[in-house]
Image (cartoon, rainbow, N blue to C red):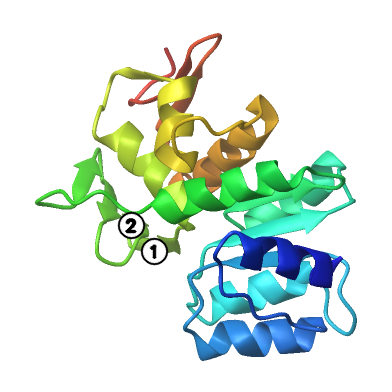
């Protein structure tokens, strides 16, 4: 499968390096220089979940798409929570992978003149960190883009389609379950203990940042 993907991606103009196992994948990611990583979950020696978690712990932010035959919601949640930017289940068409790769390569933090803040919640644009009440939480690329979109519109309802375009790019096919996983992760990072939750669902429409649930 790895060699088939390598040939297919090279035919599309990508320069491809293949890791034979999880240890090699981690070493390549730590070394840097990659524009993107397509990471299988079921790897010898070290599985893909461990690879992405170790990369993020080492502050390596290479955009990563996880691919796997394991399509259980718990596996998708685990992969995205570990720091993956996208998750694609097998079998998949090559065109779908290429579209996801193009969408991921187009992403990048929008440039705005100042950090964003709301009711004690601060989004640090330089470090992609969330700060509140002395706590600091690192955000994945997708979490950052979603929260940045919401915090630019405090008190307003941001439709699901707007969030998908911000997080994955125009034309991306993103399920409600996938978007919810990222929203759930953001909620955990936004509010802990007795802190009031600021990220709320507006059923049938989207999500909003405000002090009280709508």
Q: Nearer the viewer, residue 145 or 189?
A: 145
Q: Which mark is residue 51?
A: none
Q: Residue at x 25, y 65 (%)?
A: 126
- Categorize mark 2 by other alpha carbons within 10 Å: few (<14), some (14-19), many (20+): some
Indicate the secondary structure of the residue bearing disc 2.
Answer: strand
Q: Is residue 192 visible?
A: no
Is residue 199 placed above or below 90 in the rendered structure?
A: above
Q: Nearer the viewer, residue 90 or 186?
A: 90
Point out the tag, 1 or 2, that comes first from the N-terminus: 2
Residue 66 x, y percent position in the rendering: 71, 58
Q: Quadrant of residue 149?
A: top left
Q: Quadrant of residue 14?
A: bottom right
Q: Residue at x 76, y 63 (%)?
A: 5
Position of the N terminus by quadrant? bottom right
Position of the C terminus by quadrant? top left
Which residue is under mark 1?
Answer: 136
Determine the residue located farthest toward the top in the rendered image. Answer: 204
Q: Would you say 83 lies left or right of 170 here?
A: right
Residue 178 x, y percent position in the rendering: 65, 36
Q: Would you say 155 lies left or right of 87 here?
A: left
Is residue 104 placed above or below 154 in the rendered structure?
A: below
Q: Residue at x 55, y 8 (%)?
A: 204
Is residue 47 placed above or below 172 in the rendered structure?
A: below
Q: Would you say 106 lies left or right of 21 here?
A: left
Q: Which mark is residue 131?
A: 2
| Mark 1 touches mark 2? (CB < 8 Å) | yes
Q: Would you say 196 lies left or right of 55 here?
A: left
Indicate the secondary structure of the residue bearing disc 1.
Answer: strand
Q: Is residue 84 visible?
A: yes
């Amino acid at each position: 499968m790895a060699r088939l993907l390598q040939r297919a991606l090279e035919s599309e103009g990508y320069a491809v390096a293949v890791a034979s196992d999880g240890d090699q994948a981690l070493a390549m990611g730590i070394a840097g220089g990659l524009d993107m990583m397509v990471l299988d979950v079921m790897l010898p020696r070290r599985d893909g979940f461990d690879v992405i978690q170790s990369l993020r712990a080492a502050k390596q932010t290479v955009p990563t798409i996880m691919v796997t035959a394991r399509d259980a919601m718990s596996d998708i949640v685990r992969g995205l929570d570990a720091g993956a930017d996208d998750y694609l289940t097998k079998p998949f068409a090559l065109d779908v992978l290429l579209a996801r790769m193009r969408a991921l390569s187009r992403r990048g933090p929008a440039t705005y003149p100042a950090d964003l803040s709301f009711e004690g919640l601060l989004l640090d644009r330089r470090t992609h960190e969330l700060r509140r009440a002395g706590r600091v939480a690192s955000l994945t690329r997708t979490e950052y883009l979603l929260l940045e979109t919401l915090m630019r519109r405090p008190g307003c309802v941001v439709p699901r389609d707007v969030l998908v375009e911000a997080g994955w790019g125009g034309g991306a096919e993103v399920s409600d379950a996938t978007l919810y996983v990222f929203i759930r992760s953001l909620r955990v990072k936004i509010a802990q203990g007795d802190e009031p939750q600021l990220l709320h669902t507006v059923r049938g429409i989207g999500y909003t940042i405000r002090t009280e649930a709508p």
